[in-house]
Image (cartoon, rainbow, N blue to C red):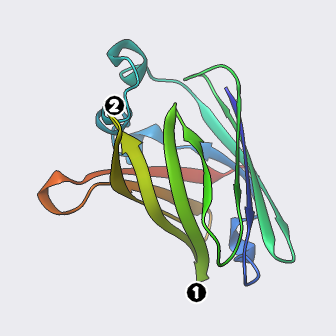
């Protein structure tokens, strides 16, 4: 799968995010529960595979190219500062507002699950040669969170 994510931000993106990152499945949480909640068929949601992200930074933007064995195709997400942006993640429609908070890119909004807008949040940050890309769908006891851990490719 090739996924392109372009984010336009009100502040400069954290420079620590730039580079090539490879998924560390051993230290990541299982993607299956989140993918199943988004309506991905169970045989795909339980599949394992490699994921590599190449992150490029502009003065007020971030572009993430994702290559994965989970799904074929290209998805593009564009986020504009101060305005809602919409798109699709694994077929689930979302609306989010991004912002740079310290060294984190944080986006909040909703994602449609079975036609119902559900709270949706993403956070992406790097500490040294480790990056976390965290997705949360829902709130409280109903929340499903996925923490994808990536290691910098040198």
Q: Position of residue 64 (x, y in %)?
A: 73, 51
Could you tell whether 149 is left or right of 37 in the image?
right
- Pick the residue in front: 35 or 16: 35
Residue reaching furthest front?
A: 115
* For residue 39, above or below residue 24: above
For the residue carrying disc 1, how many other residues have a C-alpha within 10 Å: few (<14), some (14-19), or many (20+)?
few
Task: Give coordinates of residue 121: x percent, y percent.
Answer: 43, 62
**Left or right relative to 27: residue 126:** right
Q: Residue at x 37, y 27 (%)?
A: 39
- Is 15 drawn above or below residue 132 in the view shown? below
- Residue ID at (45%, 23%): 48
- Whether residue 126 appears in this view of the structure is no
**Mark 1 touching mark 2, by CB under 8 A?**
no
Q: Residue at x 54, y 62 (%)?
A: 96
- Mark 1 or mark 2: which comes first in sequence? 2
Asked whether 121 or 130 is in front, the reply is 121
Q: Could you say which disc has been placed on residue 32 in the image?
A: 2
Can you give x and y, in whole percent of width and height, for residue 10 in the image?
Answer: 72, 82
Residue 33 vertical placement versus 63 (above, below)? above
Residue 66 on image: x %, y %: 69, 40
Q: In the figure, is residue 19 to the left or right of 148?
A: right
Numbered circle sitting on residue 64: none
User: How would you rate the neighbour count of disc 2 (Cα within 10 Å): few for under 14, some for 14-19, many for 20 or more?
Assistant: some
Q: Residue 124 falls in which quadrant of the image? A: bottom right
For the view shown, which residue lies furthest in the right direction?
59
Q: Secondary structure at mark 2?
A: helix
Q: How many marks?
A: 2
Asked whether residue 50 appears in the rendered view, the answer is yes
Q: What SS does tag 1 mark?
A: loop
Foreground residue, 75 or 104? 75
Where does label 1 land, which residue? 102
Distance from disc 1 to disc 2, alpha carbons, whole Å, reads 30 Å
């Amino acid at each position: 799968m090739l996924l392109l994510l372009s984010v336009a931000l009100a502040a400069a993106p954290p420079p620590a995010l730039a580079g090539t990152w490879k998924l560390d499945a051993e230290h990541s949480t299982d993607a299956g529960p989140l993918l199943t909640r988004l309506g991905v068929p169970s045989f795909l949601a339980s599949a394992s595979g490699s994921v590599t992200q190449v992150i490029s930074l502009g003065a007020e933007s971030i572009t993430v190219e994702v290559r994965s064995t989970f799904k074929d195709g290209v998805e593009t997400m564009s986020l504009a500062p101060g305005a809602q942006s919409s798109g699709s993640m694994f077929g689930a429609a979302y609306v989010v507002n991004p912002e740079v908070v310290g060294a984190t890119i944080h986006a909040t909004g909703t994602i449609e699950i079975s036609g119902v807008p559900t709270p949706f949040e993403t956070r992406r940050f790097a500490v040294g040669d480790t990056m976390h890309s965290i997705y949360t769908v829902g709130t409280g006891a109903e929340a499903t969170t996925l923490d994808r851990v990536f290691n910098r490719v040198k």
